[in-house]
Amino acid sequence: MSGIRTNAAAELLGVSPNTLRSWERRFGYPEPRRTAGGHRQYELGELEALRRALLETHNISSAIQVARQRGEGLGSSSRLVEAFDRFDEGLADRLMEESLALRSIERSVEELLLPALEIAESREGREAEYELACRWATGWLHAARRVCPAASRPDGVLLFDSSPGLTLEGLQVQALELGLRRAGFRVLLLSVGLAQERMTRAMRALDPTALVLCGTGATLDVVGRLVYSVRQLGSSAPLFEYRGAMPVSGSHNIPSLGGTPSEAVRNLKAMVDGSAFGRIAAVASRAGSRP
Amino acid sequence: MRHLARVHPSTEQRRSNREELTRFCTHCAELFGAPTAPADKPLRGRVCGNCGLGVILTCSSATLTAPRAAFLVVTADLRVSASSRAAEDVLAIPDGSYGRPLLSLLTSPAGIGELARAVIRAANGTLAPSTIPVLVASKDLEARIGGCGNPPAALLVLEPVAS
Ligand SMILES: [Zn+2]
């Protein structure tokens, strides 16, 4: 794998080259190789691990600790990014197949596909590679969805999506849809902006047990209209949000299902199956009645 | 009640939040004003350009009123995930000792149940701060506790007891 020069590595992490060198002195990480000419060359895998850890932690030394612990495990998403960079969808397919030989679809999506897309999204000047990555991942998730077993639970989940098309955010929603289907839920994914009269038949067919706001494109107005429409149609299903879908402003008390597909599926299963559901559903229902 | 559902508000909310939210460094505790980074570039400005050792989080400006404050960032499982340089002096904890239980560092005359409740409420997204007396290394202080993120956590700002 070719190394990444200091300026590009710093750009990828959103820091200055000086900060990157100061981390190397203080923490010994990320640790670059040196070229014959003495230039630093960073491993994409280390940078990727650190990039993710920076978003998940509250200080640099913890981020570095987390990135170190992940170590080798993240190398494969770098390889997937390399496949995007070569515009080689066949290689991307093979890497996913290799992953599926070792781990579940859920883990392959969360530990390989989505992290690779995060890297692809973060790079300036690589828009074509990112678009290819999004198109390939959309196809892959659709293919996985088509071979999901039939729903094994009576519970229906209605996902309201406000993410823009062909983006990592939209793929996070598709990954949630896949995870819910594989967990046996009946699932319907609709646009958040759908007018009430267009929603009636869908609501009647699904009779949802839970409603989930997804994507970060909805304003409070849109959410308010949506909740009003749903309640007008007679549904008292509790409303949840996924990955910070509620706009930050305004008064709301909508419980979060979490930030990853598996976390959201786990929470939804626990809520539906366990006694916590009644309590959380009551909170969500109250929140939904005063958007 | 205000919640921190995400720290990069959409364009429509940005103006109204400008007065209410502030970004801060978890290490040097400098303040950087209201969030402005677009939601699709979360890593832009994630690391503090001032010290290079803290990450930039967002909280209510009612919780963090001045720069270089002594504070702890605490997760919903009551573990310290960051501390400002000033807090490291107050609590005598070295850099890098993260993950330790909050209650091993401070207690509250109001009861640890009350303290835990305030921290968990904030860590679950309640931005508006509440104040609770705390006992730190035999010193009576006050902790102003409000939500911060992302990822979501409670921010405990340690200050002398207001007379
Ligand atoms: Zn700083």
Image: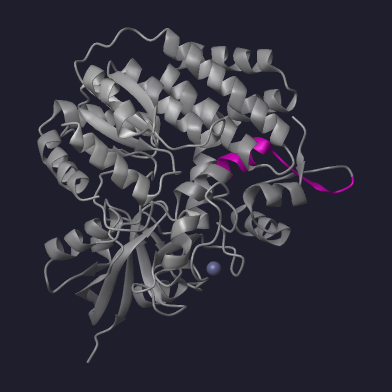
Position in image of residue A220 (x %, y %): 35, 51
Magenta segment: does it hold A42? yes
Instruction: Please give the name of the residue rendered at 10% of the width and 36% of the height, measured from the top-left corner.
Output: A278
On screen, residue A217 versus residue B134, left or right, reads: right
Q: A234 or B149: nearer the eye? A: A234
Q: Is residue B16 above or below residue B141?
A: above
On screen, residue A42 versus residue A122, left or right, reads: right
Instruction: Please give the name of the residue rendered at 76% of the width and 38% of the height, measured from the top-left corner.
Output: A3
Magenta segment: does it hold A49? yes
Identify the residue at the far front of this view: A197
Q: Is residue B11 above or below residue B128?
A: above
Highlighted magenta segment, given as a residue range: A37-50
Q: Quadrant of the N terminus of chain B?
A: bottom left
Instruction: Please give the name of the residue rendered at 36% of the width and 45% of the height, measured from the top-left corner.
Output: A222
Position in image of residue A30 (x %, y %): 64, 47
Q: Quadrant of ligand 1?
A: bottom right
Quarter of the view holding residue A129: top right
Q: Quadrant of the C terminus of chain B?
A: bottom left
Instruction: Please give the name of the residue rendered at 36% of the width and 77% of the height, measured from the top-left corner.
Output: B90
